[in-house]
Image: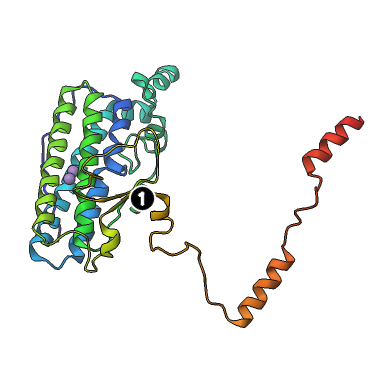
Amino acid sequence: MFAHNKRLQYSVHVDACNPGLANLMLEQFGGPDGELAAAMRYFTQALGEDDPGRKDMLLDIATEELSHLEVIGTVVAMLNKGAKGELAEGANAAAEMYRSLHGAGNDSHLTQILYGGGPALTNSGGVPWSAAYIDSRGDPTCDLRSNIAAESRAKMIYERLINVIDDPGVKDALGFLMTREIAHQQSFEKALYAIQPNFPPGKLPGKPEFADVYVNTSQGEGDMRGPWNSDDNFRYVSKAEEFLAMDGGDGRPDVQLTDHESKVLRELQQRTRSNPQGNPKTGAELGIDGHAQM
Ligand code: MN
Ligand code: MN
């Protein structure tokens, strides 16, 4: 079960209300790399997990992400406090309130007009949160790799937000949230390497003749060699005849059809065949002719 503790995971001090900044913060509240996405990603993975160690870790991190959601949502609410009261009470002249919604060049009209200054589950552009942000596949090595990437994305978004914030209290809270994503990335990496073997993902091995081939399909000036395609690690294939087709066949598709399927398909081809000899007039050309007659 969940129980709520009224203390935040990190104390939030906001120096001055700033609705434009609040709007930017929504990126980590209801955005694709935000805290709700992280919490739901790890919580649902934990429910389906059978390994006791990973299940415990996923529940710990999922619950911490919900606590981060609370911190960032509180930051949003506090940055909006001034504008919220003024708008609700109609306390200022219209022009002044209009200006306050667009403070510091950050448009916050959606947050203010539609959501009344409360933290909305949208990204900073107003796009509603979506479960499609979560890409779990139910395989631990797949999902841990995706979690590692998700944590590094979250770290980068916090870093960008920190770079545009001058409020010391908000900067400090975001520094904490950013740092926790670094710690989570470490845990997910360790958990991935605690599974041996973990590459390739799943149980089936790849076809050995294709598994270590690097195909140089974009050829010309700019071709470059490195560990990602070196002869130490890969068989580097550049000749077209070696990859057209890679199975050594003629590269043509075929399919077995029943007599009935073949007959119907021939009828379709006959009915929709194109005439390469004709030169049909187009609507555009007819329009040109009409214009010329005027
Ligand atoms: Mn987080
Ligand atoms: Mn995290």
In the rendered image, the residue lying farthest to the bottom is 259
- Front in this rendered view, residue 17 or 154: 154
**Vertical relation: 25 (above or below) 247:** above
Q: Pinpoint residue 142: horizontal percent, then vertical percent.
A: 23, 58
**In front here: 31 or 196?**
196
Residue plotted at (11% across, 41% down): 9
Tell me which residue sits at (21%, 31%) in the image.
Answer: 159
Give the quarter of the figure containing the N terminus. bottom left
Q: Say which residue appears at 34% left-offset and 37% top-offset.
A: 223
Quadrant, the C terminus:
top right
* Location of residue 283 (image quadrant): top right
The spot of residue 250 in percent (x, y) is 47, 63
Q: How many numbered markers are drawn? A: 1
Q: Is residue 62 above or below residue 249?
A: above
Which quarter of the picture shows residue 97?
top left
- At x 10% / y 46%, what residue is drawn? 186
Q: Does the rendering let one see residue 74?
A: no
Q: Is residue 287 visible?
A: yes
- Viewer-closest of 227 and 8: 227
Q: Amino acid at mark 1?
A: Ser
- Residue 237: x %, y % from top left: 33, 50
Image height check: is 116 above or below 204?
A: above
Q: Check the image and tell me how it is coloured.
A: rainbow
Residue that lies at the very extreme toward the right in this rendered image: 293
**Picture quadrant where residue 90 is located:** top left
Q: Secondary structure at mark 1?
A: loop
Mark 1, Cα crowd under 10 Å, few <14 / some 14-19 / many 20+, is some
Image quarter for ligand 2: top left
Q: Percent position (x, y) of residue 162? A: 21, 27
Residue hosting label 1: 130
Q: Nearer the viewer, residue 21 or 162?
A: 162
